[in-house]
Amino acid sequence: MTELPLDQILHGDCIDLLARLPEKSIDLIFADPPYNLQLQNELWRPNMTKVDAVDDEWDQFASFEAYDRFTEAWLTACRRVLKDTGTLWVIGSYHNIYRVGKILQDLGYWILNEVVWVKSNPMPNFRGVRFTNAQETLIWAQKHKGAKYTFNHHAMKRLNGDLQMRSDWLIPLCTGAERIKLNGEKAHATQKPEALLYRVILASSNPGDVVLDPFFGAGTTGAVAKKLHRRWIGIERDDTYVKVAQARIEAAAAPLYDEYVFENEEKRRQPRIPFGALLENGLLRPGEALYFGARGDITATVAADGSLIYDGARGSIHQIGAKIKNAPTCNGWTHWYYLDAQTGARVVIDTLREKLRAEGSG
């Protein structure tokens, strides 16, 4: 393929289809491969009802060696299509994740984080012979050690109530209306909750990025990518899963707003521009009036040293803004407006800062 089949499900084996995609074309990969659970017997609850466990053909391998060969093949294929700045997430349980991690490292991936998905509503151990398995592990890895990669730290912090997000994520299993069913049965045995993919995609990609899922299943990755204004590609070999995922994504709500609401402002990666640089570069003039807000009558005067003068006080755009709001802090870049000479409209001063960033000034 010379062009990426964006927003499509590719029907077939992931190793074969990955080989047809352009090299270094994918920003983010989320992989939920077979776990090789090695179930030996049927599972029954104490009330003698059978547990709907993972007994599908796609999760069965003849040996650990066979599973390792399969894992090495698909991880190698993913590495070829991943951009040098891209990252990969892979999820698993104790049955397979340690083998996957070792192969990841052998292939040259560099592990960035281990994230533990703690299930708030795990399935009990019905036989009472082990602890309840209440977690799964996600490995987040980059293609090359030391390469630049996307991590929207501030977005994750805001998502977590303004606290830095930890690597243990308490998220319930996929149940209720979110769980897709066919004829009263689970459409996919290991359907992942959208909340889990929301964090993964928001944390490690940007609007417009291409997200690939080589084990697409019920289409959770595509549904969430669509909602977050990302492009997506799914690969799935099972006919039924392809139909389920396609219907699900077509029914998924499109983004309600323009793309700007999905942008992640990662301040630590942006060049710092002082307010005084706007004066030094002629974008504002000493003595000019700035307006506090897009509407309203409050104004302050720009001083030659980059401070603002308002009601007998003098300070930075943030200090004067906080004084007007009677608040401890204020982001002056998003509160102060200048008057555009050509249109007569008020324009937020942050547009002038972005202009300098684009020009490499400041």
Image (tube, rainbow, N blue to C red):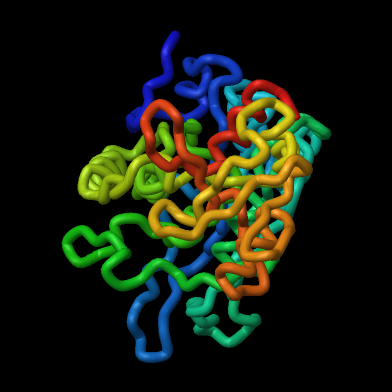
Please name whichever residue, 97 or 193, is drawn nearer the observer in this view of the structure: 193
Instruction: Name the image quarter holding residue 148.
Output: top right
Q: Report the number of discs.
A: 0
Considering the image in quadrants, where does the C terminus appear?
top right
Residue 102 x, y percent position in the rendering: 78, 44
Instruction: Name the image quarter holding residue 233.
Output: top left
Q: Residue furthest bottom?
A: 47
Please name whichever residue, 202 or 79, is drawn nearer the observer in this view of the structure: 202
On the question of residue 284 being in view, the answer is yes
User: Is 34 placed left or right of 283 in the picture?
Assistant: left
Residue 183 x, y percent position in the rendering: 17, 62
Residue at position x 64%, y 34% in the image: 285
User: Is 119 placed left or right of 130 in the picture?
Assistant: left
Residue 109 x, y percent position in the rendering: 75, 35
Considering the image in quadrants, where does the N terminus appear?
top left
On the question of residue 74 being in view, the answer is no
User: Is 195 placed left or right of 285 in the picture?
Assistant: left
Instruction: Check the image and report above or below for 223 versus 213.
Output: below
Instruction: Check the image and report above or below for 194 versus 63.
Output: below
Residue at position x 67%, y 34% in the image: 278
Q: Residue furthest top?
A: 2
Residue 232 x, y percent position in the rendering: 41, 34
Residue at position x 53%, y 39% in the image: 206
User: Is 105 placed left or right of 244 in the picture?
Assistant: right
Residue at position x 28%, y 60% in the image: 180
Please name whichever residue, 21 or 292, is drawn nearer the observer in this view of the structure: 292
Q: Residue furthest left?
A: 183
